[in-house]
Amino acid sequence: MLALSSLSFLYPWVLTALIALPLIWWLLRIVPPQPKSVTFPAIQFLYNLKKDEQSSATTPWWLLLLRLLIAALIIIAIAGPVINLPEQRNSSGDVVMIVDDGWTAAESWEGLKTTFSKLVTEANRQERQVYVVTTSALATGVLPDFRPLADREALGIATSIEPKSWPSSYDDLSQLMPRLETLDNPEFIWLSSSVLPEDEISGLVEFFQTIRALGPLTIFHSEELIVSPVIGTPEIAGEILSIPLSLPTGATGTSGLLTARNGSGQIVASAPFVFEAGEDSTTVALNVPNKVRNNIRRLEIANSRNTGALFLLDQRWQRRQVGLISSDSTQLDQPLLNETHYLVQALEPFFDIAEGTVEELLEGEHSLIALGDTANLPEGVERSLADWVAKGGVLVRFAGPKLANSTSTLVPVDLRSGNRSLQGAMSWNQPAPLGPIPQDSPFARLDIPDEITVTTQVLANPSPGLLDKTWAQLEDGTPLVTAAREGAGWLVLFHTTATPEWSNLALSGLFVEMLREIGNLGQFTGQNLSDQRSLPPFQMLDGFGRLGAETGVAEPLDMSEMTGASLNASHPPGYYGDENFSIALNIGQFDTSYSVMDASEFPATVQYFDKSVVIELVMPLLVAALLLVLIDQIISLYLQGRLPAFRTTGKVSAILLSVGLGLANFPINSEAQDADLSGDAKALAATLDTRLGYIRTNDQTIDVMSRAGLVGLSRQLRNRTAVEAKDPIAINIEQDDLIFYPLIYWPITPDFPTLSEQAILKLNDYFNGGGTILFDTRNQNSVSSYGMDLYNSPENIRLRQLTARLDIPRVHQVPPDHVVTRAFYLMQTFPGRYDGGEVWIEDTSGNQGNDGVASVVIGSNDWAAAWAIDEDGRYQAATLPGNERQRELAYRFGINLVMYTLTGNYKADQVHVPAILERLGQ
């Protein structure tokens, strides 16, 4: 009854035909059933002749009722019955849908996406022009995309759109007003996340008040809003990791569990939190040992799925072990005169400090050792320190009277004997201030306070490479901090003391920041310092907080501009750098305040998201009507005597039941053979014979075409090559094993389900085991709809989403000399049903694994449709622009690809070069 309450009809006027049912009843009653036909042997006829008077036969009432039911089902099906159809909007003008797809929409995404799809479907039925504006920030100064969409394109966006990991931006919407004013009787729909940046609310209200004058405005939002806290920037104090949490203004108090996970995803620490009524901020403290804390890679709110509810940690939150050596063991009762005091104060906020002798510290796991003013070190000790530096250690030394009069070689530059005093009657009658930081220095992004001065320092001997080794200098260019690479490590020298004796640098915050930057050098091993300023995107977060290797259109991150960076499509949250060193960007690092939307502030009709799925009943009703027609025909044949006589009605029932079950189980496509195979039988079939596989989608038409295409390709393989390929097998990506198939064809659809963790592991194992997947987006014919670039097409967007967490290496366009161009046929173009699409393949140069066979091939030419044949061997789809040569080349590409997956880089051997050149006529 609940389902019937949401039943509606697309063409309700068709239901008036039900009035004719009494007339149909009357017509069926006055028309007698067809006379029974019997053989006419004269004696038998006379024997059966009856003398009593009989009335004319009539159609049984139950048969009349069956036929009326068939007529009623057909009429109702034509009327277009639909369950959960959205409310009809009687408008013929343009419809503009503003969709919040920033990170705040992730929690209510299911309802938003379902409502979006329903609204687009309804607009397409009403033949209205659809415009879609997404609010996630593209990049600084880039306006949201605004253009008319074709029906298929709009529906593709509705089914493939996913929340972004960066915030929505509403400031640029007002710049669309000139274009909005040109629309024909527009209607505006805002699918809101209900959580907005506080500093943009007033401008957003003003914008909607303006467009309200152009047409009606409807706001959809979640009826039961789930708001997760935003994780702010953690702070370290000793062994305590303090994590601030904040709720959007207007959100009700909540409680939950904060978890900390390591790089493998395992929970290493957790703590509950509670927001009291009226509070929108709290702090969670995790008390974990240093070694455990250094392994934490992400903090997240349990059971939340948005980017703001997690925080990625990088090396900046790892406290490394620092060894501290001091040559001055006196004056312990006067710490302000001891250089160790100032080093401890500067290093302690970021590092765990261990003090000891050189020998003791070299035995520990230290990434950095700080050495105060020392004279000549013993030869064995200096050699041990040099070996430690060469293996990747960072040694930081400080000058003083002892170093000024020593002959130590464990320094980055040659030093002059004696020290330089700036307090005498020389031209430097005032302490020297610091000068500009060299561009290639790791201190380049630090601010230099004017009050820092130097009175005494150790001078470096001039040399051609001195400027390249200078990280900080005085105003006159005299080096203050120098450094040099020694093996895999670094030698760093401060040309002044670690106490205020020669400079007030040790009393400044700059001293702390310098030591912190030097402490990061252990993570830059093997890199050039000039490369540290621009970090490429490494691992990005999606809108649901999942970390993947797909970087999309993300651009490198300039570390010198990190303080002024903003999150958008160019710089989404995630890791920037590489596996050796990476910097994390998070939602919580930016001081943005959010607020729950107050719908009463907006001049609009407010409705809730509709999570119910639209169910069309046309096909089920027509199938039921067809089944009843078959039953009616069997009954009619029986009444006419054209079926053998049955002694009991039980046999009639058995026949009718068998027909009904047979129709219900009748295969509706050619995949029936595969459906009969269980998991073990399917694996056995793929093991005993060479078979190609194809991934099942949610679209039956595409699955039928995929099977027909691989059937056609398998037939050509048998006819032209030594490969005895049997019919292909459909693969359920979540259930079936993949390892048995040398090549798998995967047609990409915009609504392909999200892959589970099990499926991702299975696919990665398949790639590592030598398998190859041909990803086919099949949309080359739609290239003109996307400005000659399919990157933002629904199929390509879904492909990037599906492969984001797969272990797929770098791909490039098929080079002219690739083995796939000569594995069986010599060819340079790879058309399918469509021609002109680019074909991308894994770059296997330098990789000897899997015999050099690429694990991934990507294209858009719809090869299965070009290969597809029916049971009679006739082609299923026409090629575009269309000629038999194009289909022949499509078959040749398929054969080359199969031979390439089976034989590897065999045709790359030099022994084949003479034969290939002869065929090319060279």
Image (cartoon, rainbow, N blue to C red):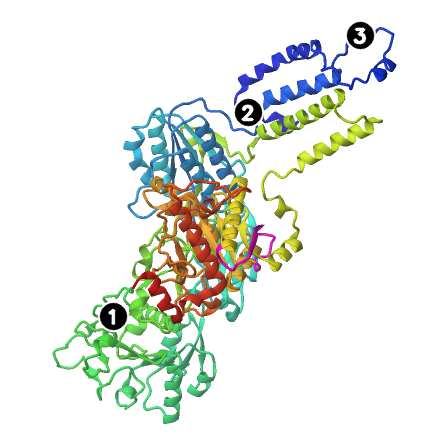
The image quadrant that residue 142 belongs to is top left
Q: Nearer the viewer, mark 1 or mark 3?
A: 3
From the viewer's side, name the closer residue of 156 and 417: 156
Callout 3: 10 Å neighbours few (<14), some, many (20+)? few
Secondary structure, magenta segment, majority class: loop
Which of the two labelled residues, at mark 2 and mark 1, occupies the earlier sequence position?
2
Amino acid marked by disc 2: Gly
Q: Residue at x 22, y 88 (%)?
A: 418
> Which numbered circle lies on residue 80?
2
From the viewer's side, name the closer residue of 457 and 888: 888
- Reply yes or no: does residue 785 show up in magenta: no
Left or right side of 25 for 263: left
| Cα separation between marks 1 and 3 | 123 Å
Q: On screen, 124 above or below 720?
A: above
Dot 2: element? loop
Q: Is residue 729 visible?
A: yes
x and y, in percent, of residue 237 in the image: 46, 66
Q: Is residue 282 visible?
A: no
x and y, in percent, of residue 331 in the image: 38, 84
Which of the two labelled residues, at mark 1 and mark 3, occupies the earlier sequence position?
3
Q: On screen, 347 above or below 156?
A: below
Q: Residue at x 52, y 23 (%)?
A: 10
Instruction: State the extent of the magenta-drawn residues as a range.
Output: 720-740
Q: Which residue is mark 3?
A: 55
| Marks 1 and 3 close (CB-CB < 8 Å) | no
Q: Which residue is mark 1?
A: 452
From the viewer's side, name the closer residue of 478 and 392: 392
Q: Nearer the viewer, mark 2 or mark 1?
A: 2
x and y, in percent, of residue 919 in the image: 35, 62
Q: Residue at x 66, y 51 (%)?
A: 678
